[in-house]
Image (cartoon, rainbow, N blue to C red):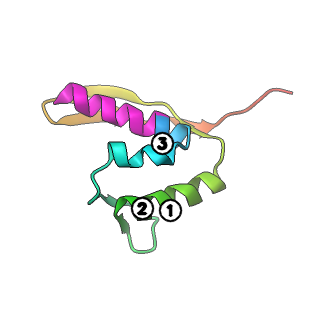
């Protein structure tokens, strides 16, 4: 289970968050997803389509966001992640 979970976490951050490939959400997430976030008005969002809407708004606010996935600890059904993030800066 740990290898599959690791792959899904990496795909989520690399494909969905970093590359904004929101069409792949159905491949990665359970359709009954409940995403908890204290910054959301209701504190959570339910369902893949609603989650996609939140991600699209987030990406429009931060179009150059990049998160690097660093997995620090793997156990049977748990992962400990470090997620450094920031904007890409191009030198001129």
According to the picture, the residue beneath numbered tag 1 turns out to be 53
**Circle 3 residues within 10 Å: few <14, some 14–19, many ≥20:** some
In the rendered structure, does residue 9 fall within the stretch colored magenta?
yes
Tag 1: Cα neighbours inside 10 Å, few (<14), some, or many (≥20)? few
Q: Are marks 2 and 3 in contact (CB under 8 Å)?
A: no
Q: CA distance from mark 1 to mark 3?
A: 13 Å
Q: Are marks 1 and 2 in contact (CB under 8 Å)?
A: yes
Percent x, y of residue 51: 42, 60
Q: Residues within 10 Å of mark 2 (few under 14, many from 20)?
A: some
The stretch in magenta equals 1-14
Question: Does label 1 or label 3 sit earlier along the sequence?
Answer: 3
Task: Give the left or right position of residue 52, taking residue 74 as reference.
Answer: right
Figure disc tally: 3
Picture layout, residue 75 above or below residue 57? above
Q: Measuring 87% from the left and 27% from the top, which residue is drawn there?
A: 92
Residue for badge 3: 16
Looking at the rendered structure, the secondary structure element under dot 2 is helix
Considering the image in quadrants, where does the N terminus appear? Answer: top left
Residue 25, position as x, y percentages in the image: 40, 47
Q: CA distance from mark 2 to mark 3?
A: 13 Å
The stretch drawn in magenta includes residue 85? no
Residue to which mark 2 is pinned: 49
Residue appearing at x 34%, y 36% in the figure: 9
Instruction: Identify the main secondary structure in magenta.
Output: helix
Is label 2 or label 3 in front? 2
């Amino acid at each position: 289970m740990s290898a599959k979970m690791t792959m899904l976490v990496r795909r989520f951050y690399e494909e969905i968050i970093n590359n904004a490939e929101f069409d792949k959400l159905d491949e990665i997430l359970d359709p009954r997803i409940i995403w908890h976030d204290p910054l959301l008005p209701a504190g959570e969002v339910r369902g893949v389509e609603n989650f996609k809407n939140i991600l699209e708004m987030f990406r429009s606010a931060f179009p150059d966001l990049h998160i690097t996935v660093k997995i620090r600890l793997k156990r049977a059904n748990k992962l400990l992640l470090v997620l450094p993030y920031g904007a890409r800066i191009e030198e001129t």
